[in-house]
Image (spheres, helix red, strand yellow):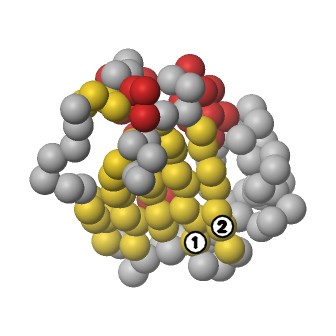
Amino acid sequence: MNVVCDLPEELPFLYADGRLVRQIVLNLLTNAIKFTGKGGDVVLDANIDAEGCCEIRVADTGLGIGPEYLDSIMQPFVQVDSGIDRKYESTGLGLSLVKSMVELHDGTVEIESTTGEGTTVTVRFPASRVRA
């Protein structure tokens, strides 16, 4: 598996709890790596968008999430594979914690996914939290 950090040379500071931002990124990377098989790709990138918001994105070429789960996947304890014989161990808290931590910073989380092709999670912090 290839894990790539595609980060610009310099990003402005983010007015945020550094510990929580690290946990957000760690949770997203952990999920992406867990659900991406051998030979797949996981990419972490960040940028400041046209509106001045800070976007952190983790994209993978893993299993993907079916459209029927996208509305509920950020709820606590929700797991796509919740059967007794499930392949991946998990509490189902990672994405719900990400959502809560991002919302504490007035941000948003967006998930785009296609089953069998991968998932992209974008965390967006408002421009009011970006410091030049």
Q: Position of residue 33 (x, y in %)?
A: 45, 59
Q: Amino acid at mark 1?
A: Gly
Specify the quadrant of the image occupied by residue 128.
Answer: top left
Q: Quadrant of the C terminus?
A: top left
Read off the residue under disc 1. Answer: 118
Q: Is residue 87 shown above or below 124?
A: below
State the residue in front, 74 or 80: 74
Q: Position of residue 92 (x, y in %)?
A: 69, 40
Q: Residue at x 20, y 56 (%)?
A: 8
Horizontal side, residue 20 vs residue 71: left or right:
left
Residue 121 seen in render: yes
Q: Residue furthest left?
A: 9
Cα distance in 3D space between marks 2 and 1: 6 Å
Q: Residue at x 58, y 65 (%)?
A: 119
Mark seen at residue 93? none
Specify the quadrant of the image occupied by residue 11.
Answer: top left
Horizontal side, residue 35 vs residue 1: left or right:
right
Kindly indicate whether the residue at mark 1 contacts the one at mark 2 (C-beta within 8 angstroms): yes
Horizontal side, residue 110 vs residue 40: left or right:
right
Q: Residue furthest front?
A: 51
Mark seen at residue 113? 2
Q: Residue at x 81, y 46 (%)?
A: 72
State the residue in front, 40 or 5: 5
Q: Residue at x 39, y 43 (%)?
A: 52
Q: Amino acid at mark 2?
A: Ser
Q: Quadrant of the N terminus?
A: bottom left
